[in-house]
Image (spheres, rainbow, N blue to C red):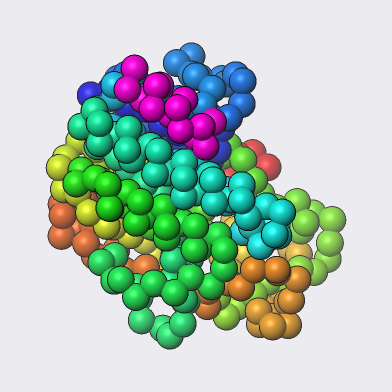
Amino acid sequence: MSFLVTGVGGQLGYDVMNELKKRGYEATGTDILPESAFKNYIPLDITDEKAVHEKITRINPDAVVHCAAWTAVDAAEDEENKPKVYAINVLGTKYIAEACKEIGCKMVYISTDYVFDGQGTEPWQPDCKDYKPLNYYGQTKLEGELAVSGTLDKYFIIRIAWVFGLNGKNFIKTMINVGKTHSEVRVVNDQIGTPTYTYDLARLLVDMCETEKYGYYHATNEGGYISWYDFCCEFYRQYGLKTKVTPVTTAEYGLSKAKRPYNSRLDKSKLKEAGFTPLPIWQDAVRRYLEEAKL
């Protein structure tokens, strides 16, 4: 199989490229930057319809793993950013899906728990269509989902949450840096979900591409549902930081421009039902990340 991976400058795209290399697959990486550490790389602005069509049809991959996205949730709320957010998350995704349809290849689209309203306590099912995004980022990711499912038959739409990986910024890296210079940190304890380690997710995405078990899936690490407070306490413990972690409500924390979902529980049972190996428990993912990241 041959692959094209978008967003290889980000956490997930980087790990997908390395997973493909490990398995001996031919893979071309793309991103907005002029160059990359990856040997097989071409710059690509996914908001340029003509460029997307030309490059994907010329490379003619068996599968496109679409990791590129606007992910700055709060900045997406700014009116001046909204056209760019829409162009990247909706139009870029649509252009990729249309090119995939033309050459008959598979497409993996990475989505988010933010397509739901985050209310209640029941885990969200992958085939649930009760969409009510709370913010503009979630709305554009939902429209990206619909562009893929409305264009293709051979697609995987994977919703993830609370992402961390080696190549880029993430909550663990940020909070450890803060914890090194502060005696106390405040972390919300009323938003519930599960983290996703991009190294583990990359393995699953390639596993999926090796099949034809198309559809919607949820994929975060195993290990039970937790709060951001629980998450922070655990990686501080593993790292050896003695910084005090104080739990606060979302309202007490304030700060965020964009509304955040309280319920980010994603039901992942469909993975097992389809014969895929679930991601390892998040506590072990944190351990492996900290060993690799050397923060």
Location of residue 227 in the rendering, given as x and y in whole percent from the top left corner: 54, 73
Q: Magenta residues, as a range?
A: 45-58
Could you tell whether 83 is left or right of 217 in the image? right
Q: Quadrant of residue 4?
A: top left
Q: Nearer the viewer, residue 259 or 253?
A: 259
> Among all residues in the image, which is located at the extreme bottom?
120
Q: Nearer the viewer, residue 251 or 64?
A: 64
The answer, for residue 226, to whether it is visible in the render is: no
The answer, for residue 252, to whether it is visible in the render is: yes
Whether the magenta-drawn stretch holds residue 12 is answered as no
Q: Quadrant of residue 107?
A: top left
Location of residue 11 in the rendering, given as x and y in whole percent from the top left corner: 53, 40
Could you tell whether 118 is left or right of 275 in the image? right
Location of residue 127 in the rendering, given as x and y in whole percent from the top left corner: 25, 66
- Quarter of the image that includes the C terminus: top right
- Quarter of the image that includes the N terminus: top left
Q: Residue at horizontal 46%, vertical 45%?
A: 91
Q: Residue at horizontal 66%, vertical 62%?
A: 77
Q: Nearer the viewer, residue 212 or 184?
A: 212
Q: Residue at horizontal 27%, vertical 47%?
A: 151
Location of residue 23 in the rendering, given as x and y in whole percent from the top left corner: 29, 25
